Image (cartoon, rainbow, N blue to C red):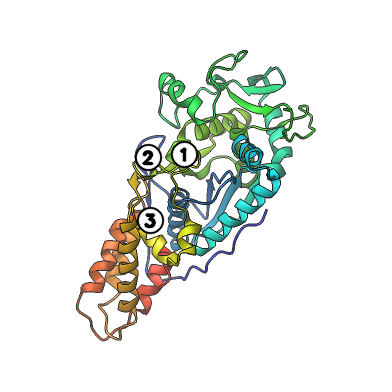
Amino acid sequence: MRSWSSPEVPSIGGSAPGLRIHDSRTDALVTSDPDDVARLYVCGITPYDATHLGHAATYLAFDLLQRQWLDRDLDVVYTQNVTDVDDPLLERANDTGEDWTKLAERETRLFCDDMEALRMLAPHHYIGAVESIDLVVDLIERLGDSVYRVDDDLYFDVHADPGFGQVSGLDEDAMRAVYGERGGDPERPGKKHPLDCLLWQGPRDGEPSWESRLGPGRPGWHIECAAIALEHLGTDFDVQGGGSDLAFPHHEMSASEASVATGEPFAQAYMHAGMVALHGEKMSKSKGNLELVSRLRETGHDSMAIRLALLAHHYRSDWEWTDKAMVAAKQRLDIWRAAVQRTTTPPGDDVIAEIRAALADDLDAPAALAAVDRWVGADGVEDDGTEVARAIDSLLGVRL
């Protein structure tokens, strides 16, 4: 599947401090210290609409994480999926009369264009659900007795995993309360337990299906990500990432499926980005309260100002987008660009160390921006801003 071109990440001198990230499973900061290779899986889009700022904020968080690993001279293997066959996509195609494959292709291409404009590091493996059907079938077969049939569909017995519930930290009452709102079917007759999740959906009239050893059908959402991650990253990889609304059921279910199939932990840490609201509610394709990256770009906003507007909020915080955010980001970008062009600037070593320290503390981008703001306002000496500009590019992904 087509991805996008990664920006060059400049190397900078000095050494990076130890990196701590928030693990949702333990609700604590943990040290991220891979030996040589850091492995990251981030759940991708269902391509039935354009990229909104909530998406962009999530992918920016894991872009910052990769930049931290790269600053430690680690190799990074980054995998991201595209759920290019799923109910919301098929429903949108049916409503508009567009072929679902063309809709998915167009919106995936727009997403890639937005990511490239925002200078997000591209995945090494960018994998669609459709191209992963054989992987899904193989993984379902490895689940053994934890799989059962309801009519033409196959379900996973979540209680086959003794650790079920540890990723999200929710008890079963809390899970049931949100499961139906987040893609689950707790009221489905014939299930052993309301929280059991769909692995393989049998054929439906007017919907795509594929022949397989399981019978005709298509993959469930959670098993898709489990299969792709295991194929390209293996077990016990460093970080599973996504928005906070994916902790349950998506990450909970994927982790349980993978653990039952392999007997090994799925991921070492689970990182979740906060939600971005508009007009008082979380940005949502289903509700239509969206600010789109592509629309901001089309109306002339600098992509680096959009990135700075997102960086102004800690990745784990929930916050609300307003037009004032773009105004402030544009002003900050103009001030920074003017500062690094001066022939006399403050020394760069201290501010680079401050940026590194802020990002090493659970990717505290607002603290890093504040450090640059202080540097910009300090008295200059006989030095230029070249090294600081390189550090801002390398660590924050902002090209000045």
Mark 2 vs mark 1: which is more N-terminal? 2
Residue 210 visible in the snapshot: yes
Mark 2 vs mark 3: which is more N-terminal? 2
Front of the two marks 2 and 3: 2
Quarter placement of the C terminus? bottom left
> Residue 362 location, x and y as percent?
35, 50
**Which residue carries the number 1 mark?**
287
Q: Quadrant of residue 46?
A: top right
**Which residue carries the number 3 mark?**
310
**Which residue is rendered at x = 65% and y = 48% of the image?**
103
Mark number, residue 107 = none
> Residue 384 location, x and y as percent?
32, 83
Residues under labels 2 and 1: Cα distance?
Answer: 9 Å
Is 383 left or right of 213, judged from the image as shown? Answer: left
User: Could you tell me the amino acid type at mark 1?
Assistant: Lys
Which structural element holds mark 1?
loop
Mark 3 vs mark 1: which is more N-terminal? 1
**Which residue carries the number 2 mark?**
281
| Other residues around mark 1 within 10 Å, as few (<14) / some (14–19) / many (≥20) | few
Which structural element holds mark 3?
helix
Whether tag 2 and tag 1 are in contact, CB under 8 A, the answer is yes
**Which residue is rendered at x = 45% and y = 32% of the image?**
167
Seen from the viewer's position, the closer of residues 27 and 253 is: 253
Residues under labels 3 and 1: Cα distance?
Answer: 22 Å
Residues under labels 2 and 3: Cα distance?
Answer: 17 Å
User: Could you tell me the amino acid type at mark 2?
Assistant: Glu
